[in-house]
Amino acid sequence: MRNNLIFVVSICRHAVCIFYLVLRALDTVEDDMTIPMEEKTELLVKFYTKLEDPDWTYDKSQEKDKIVLQDFTCVSFNQVI
């Protein structure tokens, strides 16, 4: 029983971490005033498709949390595991 609980907690922790990183990436795009509004809108509306693209990154952000967009391959790769 204890091993099952540890397994479930481990899976939930992984899912919560990925969920947080996806939300952080969305928030970074939303907060970045250097991204043109048209590009930002398209990114936000179609962001769910980026989760399925293991090679997608975004290098144009000037926000302090831009690393989550630059290294998004780690997030998109991990969400399917």
Image (tube, rainbow, N blue to C red):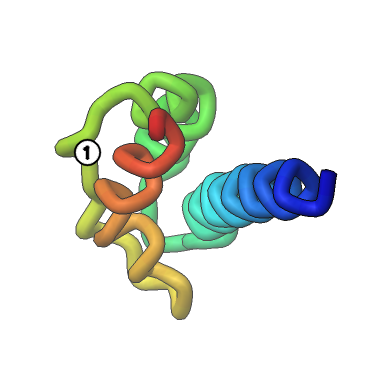
- Judge left or right: residue 24 versus residue 41: right
Secondary structure beneath disc 1? loop
Q: Tell me the crowding category of disc 1: few under 14, some 14 to 19, or many 20 or more residues within 10 angstroms, Cα based.
A: some
Image x and y of residue 6, in percent: 72, 54
Residue occupied by mark 1: 56
* Quarter of the view holding residue 70: bottom left
Image x and y of residue 9, in percent: 74, 51
* Quarter of the view holding residue 64: bottom left
Can you say whether 15 is above or below 50 in the image? below
Give the number of callouts.
1
Looking at the image, which residue sits at the far left?
55
- Judge left or right: residue 3 versus residue 39: right
Tell me the residue at 25%/27% (across/down): 53
Q: Nearer the viewer, residue 10 or 72?
A: 10
Asked if residue 24 shows in the view, the reply is yes
- Judge left or right: residue 4 versus residue 37: right
- Judge left or right: residue 39 versus residue 24: left
Q: Amino acid at mark 1?
A: Trp
Looking at the image, which residue sits at the far front?
1
Can you say whether 45 is above or below 12 in the image? above
Tell me the residue at 54%/55% (across/down): 21
Tell me the residue at 38%/52% (across/down): 35
Tell me the residue at 40%/62% (across/down): 68
Asked if residue 27 shows in the view, the reply is no
Quadrant including the N terminus: top right
Quadrant including the C terminus: top left
